[in-house]
Amino acid sequence: MIPCQRHLFDIPEDVAYLNCAYMSPLMKSVRDAGHMGIQRKVQPWSVSPPDFFSESETVRGQFARLVNAGADDVALVPAVSYGIATAALNLPVSAGSRILTLEEQFPSNIYTWRELAKETGAEVISLARPDDDDWTAAILAAIDERVAIAALPHCHWTDGAVIDLEAVGAALRSVGAALVLDLTQSLGALPFDAQAIQPDFAICATYKWLLGPYSTGFMYVAPKHQDGKPLEQNWIARLNSENFAGLVDYQDAYQPGARRYDVGERSNFALLPMASAALAQLLDWGPENIQATLAATTAAMADRAAATGLTSVAADKRAGHFLGLRFAGGVPEGLPERLAAQNILVSVRGSSMRVTPHLYNNQNDVDRLFTVLEAL
């Protein structure tokens, strides 16, 4: 169990920020790394050609460690939508085939598949929310030879209902279907093993549970897809791009592994140091320890909520870092605004009020939330 880490963040004591699923605060070390990066651009003579490669390789390796993969398996992307579009460009889909998604899934993992279905004659299937919150069973029941792709999260972004991705991945492989994951609402707080799950593509933005900056993300690419077609053609992804003087000697070959999928201007001198500082701290804590600590917090909150008549996904079907509270008759009108007026920050998605703490939260934050909820 990790003790409260509020001292690493700039969060006033009168702010109960229980909304990491919306956007994480930056640690002071991450903020300082960003300041350092901006200062280098103020004096660009301090940036040398090797810097375009060294920092991106550092952060690529850190992310690879987080997902149990190799650095060659990781591409740097600016957003989940960029990674999903890359996956769609490189996965075979035919007329009459199916693309599985979940009801109320985050739109970045929906719109691209709708467009692909229009172009190919495939069909996007939105699986209805199961009454028992068992998404795994619902997904497994829907997998057959008609499925080409399952585009899924690790846990649902509205209430934290978790999916057994190892079981789903195995079932998809048995029918020759691909698995594409948006891990933005889980990675960093929920352990993920690319070798065990074997996704085709797995994409994650850094601004939530990776505790990093906005407009930065990563994409795991299975080795069998690493010779595919990138979404764009940029100079740094090409072979021998380290030789600035030789960039006029145009190359058809790419940098090894998934680097061909890197976004242009990947060497962001402010954002990459920030992402690196955040990943270093997450790796030091360990996702398993983070999950265990947050699970204890949300379990206690779930019990307290149940005593007031609120419901949530059962603990054995929910990711431990996530709690979606459900009210009889729906979330009361104006409740999030009422809480925000008292510096208690949560969010509403779908029919759930998301309460998503992190290691910076303390018991006072929880008590303040329930003082309001119990008064209802």
Image (spheres, rainbow, N blue to C red):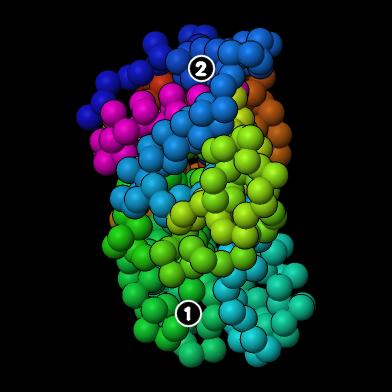
Q: What kind of element bears circle 2?
A: helix
Against 63, residue 132 (above or below) is below
Kindly identify which residue carries mark 2: 33
Q: Position of residue 333 (x, y in %)?
A: 71, 39
Q: Position of residue 138 (x, y in %)?
A: 45, 74
Query: Looking at the picture, which amino acid does disc 1 mark?
Result: Ala
Magenta stretch: helix, strand or loop mostly:
helix
In front of the other: 62 or 105: 62
Measure the alpha-carbon separation of dots 2 and 1.
Answer: 41 Å
Task: State left or right for residue 357 relative to residue 228.
Answer: left
The residue lying at 59 percent from left, 50 percent from top is 238
Query: Looking at the picture, which amino acid does disc 2 mark?
Result: Ala
In front of the other: 300 or 115: 115
The residue lying at 22 percent from left, 29 percent from top is 1
Name the mark on residue 177: 1
Task: State left or right for residue 337 relative to residue 212.
Answer: right
Task: State left or right for residue 98 relative to residue 139.
Answer: right
Alpha-carbon neighbours of circle 1 within 10 Å: few (<14), some, or many (≥20)? many
Q: Is residue 290 magenta?
A: yes
Closer mark to the observer between disc 2 and disc 1: 2
Q: Earlier in the sequence, mark 2 or mark 1?
A: 2
**Residue 134, quarter of picture:** bottom left
Against 155, residue 275 (above or below) is above
Q: Is residue 272 magenta?
A: yes
In front of the other: 269 or 65: 269
Quarter of the image with the C terminus is top right
What residue span does the magenta drawing correspond to? Answer: 270-292
In front of the other: 78 or 289: 78
The residue lying at 68 percent from left, 83 percent from top is 122
